[in-house]
Image (spheres, helix red, strand yellow):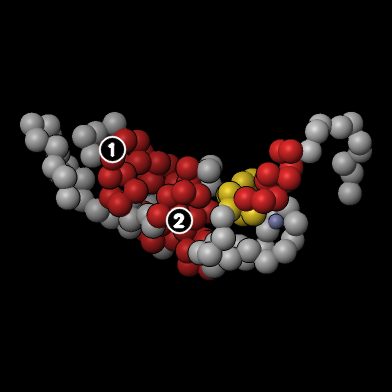
């Protein structure tokens, strides 16, 4: 692992933020404070591993999923259907985007997103 020579480093120990959140040992604001502290430190590049996030969890977080939602997903299961098309989505095998839709956090297929984006904006009613 690469060290940052000459900078204050090592003030953070790796912790499992999602687990601590899920077990109630950490509040959401405490989790974000930890994240902010890491990001503004010399350890910023390692923020995902210092918070104990997997690559998928970190990606979903970057897409806007709050850490408490990620904690729920890890311990109760990730969404397995696409929020947009309702079909099966395997987050470990498919390309996806994590997105909040209608107040619900979920995953959508990359292809579903592309279809949505490529549709020209029309004023057709979207009531469903
Ligand atoms: Zn879909």
Q: Position of residue 88 (x, y in %)?
A: 67, 66
Give the SS element for disc 1: helix
Read off the residue under disc 1.
44
For residue 91, above or below residue 62? below
Q: Position of residue 81 (x, y in %)?
A: 67, 63
On residue 56, which mark appears? Answer: 2
On residue 86, which mark appears? Answer: none
Q: Position of residue 97 (x, y in %)?
A: 58, 49
Q: Is mark 2 within 8 Å of ligand 1?
A: no
Residue at 31% across / 35% down in the picture? 39
Q: Quadrant of residue 41?
A: top left
Q: Is residue 105 visible?
A: no
Q: Disc 1 to disc 2, how far (Cα)?
A: 18 Å
Q: Nearer the viewer, residue 41 or 118?
A: 118
For residue 61, above or below residue 22? above
Q: Is residue 69 visible?
A: yes
* Local crowd size for mark 1, using a 10 Å CA cut-off: few (<14), some (14–19), many (≥20): some
Instruction: Say which label, 1 or 2, has the lower sequence index.
Output: 1
Q: Nearer the viewer, residue 67 or 64?
A: 64
User: Is the C-beta separation of discs 1 and 2 under 8 Å?
Assistant: no
Q: Position of residue 19 (x, y in %)?
A: 38, 61
**Left or right: where 60 falls relative to 48:** right
Camera-side mark, 1 or 2: 2
């Amino acid at each position: 692992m690469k060290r940052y020579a000459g900078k204050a480093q090592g003030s953070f120990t790796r912790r499992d933020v999602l687990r601590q959140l899920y077990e109630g040992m950490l509040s959401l604001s405490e989790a974000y404070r930890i994240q902010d502290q890491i990001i503004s430190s010399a350890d910023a590049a390692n923020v995902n591993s210092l918070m104990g996030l997997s690559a998928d969890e970190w990606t979903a977080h970057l897409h806007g999923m709050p850490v408490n939602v990620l904690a729920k997903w890890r311990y109760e299961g990730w969404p397995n259907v696409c929020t947009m098309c309702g079909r099966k989505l395997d987050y470990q095998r498919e390309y996806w985007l994590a997105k909040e839709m209608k107040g619900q956090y979920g995953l959508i297929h990359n292809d579903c997103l592309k279809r949505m984006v490529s549709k020209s904006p029309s004023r057709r009613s979207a009531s469903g």
